[in-house]
Amino acid sequence: GQAADALVGVPFERLVRPEHRAAVASALGRLASGDASTDVLSVAVGPAPVWLHLRLTALPGDAGALSSVVVVGREVTGHVRRADEATRQADRLRLLHAVTA
């Protein structure tokens, strides 16, 4: 829900809801420990919840230490909602089967 040019230079941690920041911090820790890239599913801050699949890629500096991180986000709200609905439907079917068996 925000213009791309308004997001340039904003630390992406500020764009993640507080309850998802630990997962993002963990992903950054994996990069600092030597992983080349990692993924995290998060919710963006904004007027409406938007699920994002974030791919974080480490860019090593001259000495091989982590220099910077490139973050590419893909909006996956529809996928997450469909997966949640499929899980709820499966739970309802299991309950129905348990009651009628």
Image (tube, grey):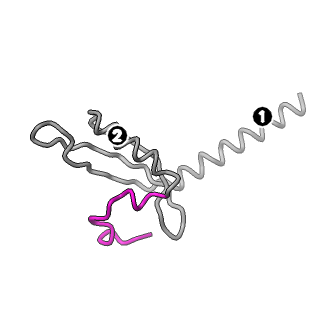
Number of numbered discs present? 2
Pick the front one: 31 or 41:
31
Viewer-nearest of labels 2 and 1? 2
Locate residue 45, reporting x and y percent.
47, 63
- Residue 90 as seen in the image, left or right of residue 75: right
Q: Earlier in the sequence, mark 2 or mark 1?
A: 2
Q: Is residue 7 magenta?
A: yes
Badge 2, how many Cα within 10 Å: few under 14, some, many 20+?
few
| Residue occupied by mark 2 | 29
Disc 1 crowd, CA 10 A, few/some/many (<14, 14-19, 20+):
few
Q: Position of residue 51 (x, y in %)?
A: 49, 55
- Which residue: 53% across, 53% down? 19
The amino acid marked with disc number 2 is Gly
- How far apart are labels 2 and 1 at the CA level? 39 Å
Q: Position of residue 74 (x, y in %)?
A: 40, 54
The amino acid at mark 1 is: Arg
Tell me if label 2 and label 1 are in contact, CB under 8 Å. Answer: no
Please tell me the numbered disc located at residue 80.
none
Q: Residue at x 28, y 39 (%)?
A: 32
Residue 94 - label: 1
Secondary structure at numbered mark 1: helix
Residues in magenta, as a range: 1-17
Q: Quadrant of the C terminus?
A: top right
